Image: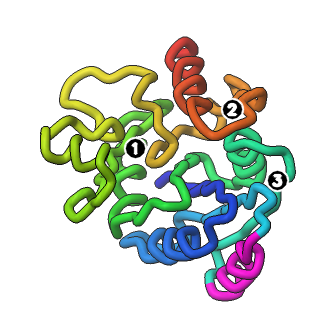
């Protein structure tokens, strides 16, 4: 059975990342099958203290610090720290369901060498945000949820995606010329698709 390294980048979101860690550490599979790596993109809040506390609580948890700005460099730092054959990227605001890691493992066992793109449910029910209300009220597809049928690199959103580590390394990981957060994941998906 393949083992998973969960990589979570974060910056100045200590409360969110604390909840994300607790949720990903409450999986239906044994902690022996996965490790959790959080890379702090040089936060100025109390993120470091939260990560130290979580490292004392969870035996399969590690963290690092990345000073170079951007999600691409931060995720690459996590990729370099990873010890397992499957890398599962989630974001620091993801509230993982208990079977998330099991679902990724199951898909990789059936589809060796492929990326697995998972769906994300956004809790829009009580939102006051006008854009999210518009999407909810008009029943517009959640852009982070793959449609039924063929999908392409444009769905490679690192809020819930896994890929074999050797495949990620073969294409060079994330392009670190992306200095701000956004689109570095889709660009990586493009290169992964081109590589087969």
- Whether pointer 1 and pointer 2 mark residues with C-beta atoms closer than 8 Å, the reply is no
Secondary element at tag 2? loop
Badge 3 crowding class, 10 Å Cα cut-off, few under 14, some 14 to 19, many 20 or more, is many
Give above or below for 28 relative to 100: below
What residue is rendered at 68% in x and 32% in y? 174
Magenta residue span: 45-57
User: Is residue 41 shown in magenta?
Assistant: no
- Of badges 1 and 3, the one in the foreground is 3
Q: How far is mark 2 from mark 3, CA to CA?
A: 14 Å
- Whether pointer 1 and pointer 3 mark residues with C-beta atoms closer than 8 Å, the reply is no
Query: Sequence order check: which comes first, mark 2 or mark 3?
Result: 3
Residue 61 at x, y percent in the picture: 66, 72
Residue 176 at x, y percent in the picture: 76, 31
Secondary element at tag 1? helix
Instruction: Tell me: 75 left or right of 151.
Output: right
What residue is rendered at 43% in x and 24% in y? 154
Q: Nearer the viewer, residue 14 or 65?
A: 14
Secondary element at tag 3? loop
Farthest left residue? 138
Query: Sequence order check: which comes first, mark 1 or mark 3?
Result: 3
Residue carrying label 1: 109
Residue carrying label 3: 66
Badge 2 crowding class, 10 Å Cα cut-off, few under 14, some 14 to 19, many 20 or more, is many
Residue 62 at x, y percent in the picture: 72, 69
User: Is residue 56 shown in magenta?
Assistant: yes
Q: How far is mark 1 from mark 3, CA to CA?
A: 32 Å
What residue is rendered at 33% in x and 36% in y? 143
Q: What's the coloring here?
A: rainbow
Q: Nearer the viewer, residue 141 or 36?
A: 141
Query: Sequence order check: which comes first, mark 1 or mark 2?
Result: 1
Residue carrying label 2: 174
Residue 181 at x, y percent in the picture: 63, 40
């Amino acid at each position: 059975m393949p083992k998973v390294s969960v990589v979570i980048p974060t910056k100045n979101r200590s409360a969110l990342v604390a909840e994300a860690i607790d949720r990903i550490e409450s999986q239906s599979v044994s902690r022996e099958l996965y490790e959790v790596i959080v890379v702090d993109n040089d936060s100025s809040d109390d993120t470091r203290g939260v990560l130290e506390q979580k490292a004392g609580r969870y035996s399969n948890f590690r963290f690092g610090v990345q000073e170079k700005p951007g999600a691409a460099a931060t995720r690459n730092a996590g990729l370099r720290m990873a010890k397992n054959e499957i890398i599962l990227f989630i974001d620091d605001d993801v509230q993982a369901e208990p079977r998330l890691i099991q679902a990724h493992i199951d898909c990789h066992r059936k589809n060796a060498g492929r990326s697995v793109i998972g769906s994300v449910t956004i809790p829009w029910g009580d939102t006051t945000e006008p854009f999210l209300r518009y999407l909810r009220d008009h029943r517009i597809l959640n852009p982070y949820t793959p449609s039924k049928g063929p999908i392409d690199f444009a769905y490679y959103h690192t809020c819930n995606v896994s890929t074999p580590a050797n495949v990620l390394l073969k294409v060079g990981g994330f392009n670190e010329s992306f200095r701000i957060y956004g689109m570095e994941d889709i660009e990586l998906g493009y290169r992964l698709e081109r590589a087969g």
